[in-house]
Image: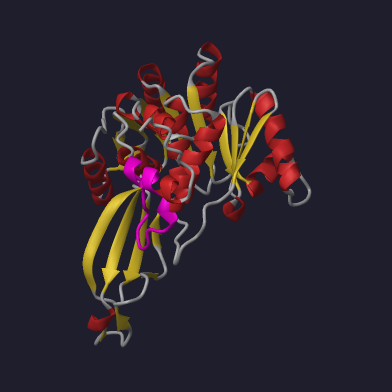
Amino acid sequence: MNLDRFYAITGRYASLRVGIVGDFCLDRYLEIDPTKSETSIETGLPVHNVVNVRAQPGGAGTILNNLCALRIGTLYPVGFVGDDGEGYELSRALEERPGVRLGLFLRTAQRRTFTYCKPLVLAPGKPPAELNRLDLKNWTPSPSLVQGIITSRLLDAAKITDALIVLDQVDIPETGVVTQRVLTSLGDHLRSNPEMLVLADSRRGLRGFPPVVFKMNAAELAALTGARKELDFDDIKRAAMELADANHRAVFVTLAERGMVGAGPGGRIEHVPALPVRGEIDIVGAGDAVSANLTAAIAGGASLREALELASAAASVVIHKLGTTGTATVLELQEKMTREGLLEDVTPA
């Protein structure tokens, strides 16, 4: 990619409208100072003294954070929070983000706010060390009323956006935002609007999703295609191309240290190697950075390879940010791609 193309693609970001449909959660970081350790008089157990609390949107909110970092013009979260303190924190964190509109976001007493509580020990001269996490989840199916409201708001978002990202973050089916009812409605909408850009990712795999742009890792691809063994590189490319042809949509497969593969209908295939690792890394949030940057790039007019290159650079930026679920700005992408020789300056002297 050259600088002119980079500027042409990222220059469109400010005019884009993107909806994020999925499981928004609260990432709450408890920063612990180990020099202030105590022992509880009552229990005799060690006390971890928290000296700072940070809260930011997680889950689908991590995708939103990345889109905000790219300065996407307008963002519409479609999801829910509970009528609880965590829901207040998450809603406040979302509304503070630039370009975010919460008119399609639901607060309901029928659900609790999905929360990851992450105690971090911050010792001088050392990377942050995460202790056992404390999570709050929903363990029962999302009520019919909640599903109906989410379905209606998803369709509202589809009418006013240039692209949708769908993220299924929950471990137990039907307990979150992306239920089968929601997916069925999305599929019905896409049959009437086949040009709509929708990218989907799910930690439980994309089986049962309508034909949209699929983003997954190699293990998820193997499970989706019914492979009985781990797929080698040629198998991955072949399976991605077959799936792209079947869905008439692009397919993206993340391969960790092997980079990323993108396939398009008609036998198009691209592979972008992973960028070098420099020092300590934290892979949390890298996949969401990829989803956000792929969607923004495609909506901004990028080719298959250009979208892969931008997403790969974003993942590299994010994994080098420790103690937080990081994001990548357009300037950081440009600096990373320039440093790694991925941007060619063809502007006349």
Measuring 53% from the left and 38% from the top, which residue is drawn there?
Answer: 308
Q: Quadrant of the C terminus?
A: top left
Vertical relation: 190 (above or below) 131 = above
The image position of residue 229, as x and y in percent, is: 77, 51
Depth order, front residue of 180/186:
186
Measuring 55% from the left and 51% from the top, which residue is drawn there?
Answer: 274
Q: Is residue 332 magenta?
A: yes
User: Which residue is at the far front?
Assistant: 349
Q: Is residue 296 left or right of residue 190?
A: left
Where residue 52 sits, quadrant-wise, is bottom left
Measuring 50% from the left and 31% from the top, which residue is drawn there?
Answer: 199
Q: Is residue 214 magenta?
A: no
Q: Is residue 168 visible to us here? A: no
Depth order, front residue of 342/168:
342
Q: Is residue 225 visible to us here? A: yes
Q: How is the image coloured?
A: secondary structure
The image position of residue 118, as x and y in percent, is: 36, 63
User: Which residue is at the far right?
Assistant: 228
The image position of residue 322, as x and y in percent, is: 37, 62
Vertical relation: 279 (above or below) 39 = above
Vertical relation: 341 (above or below) 6 = below
Q: Which residues are magenta?
A: 317-335
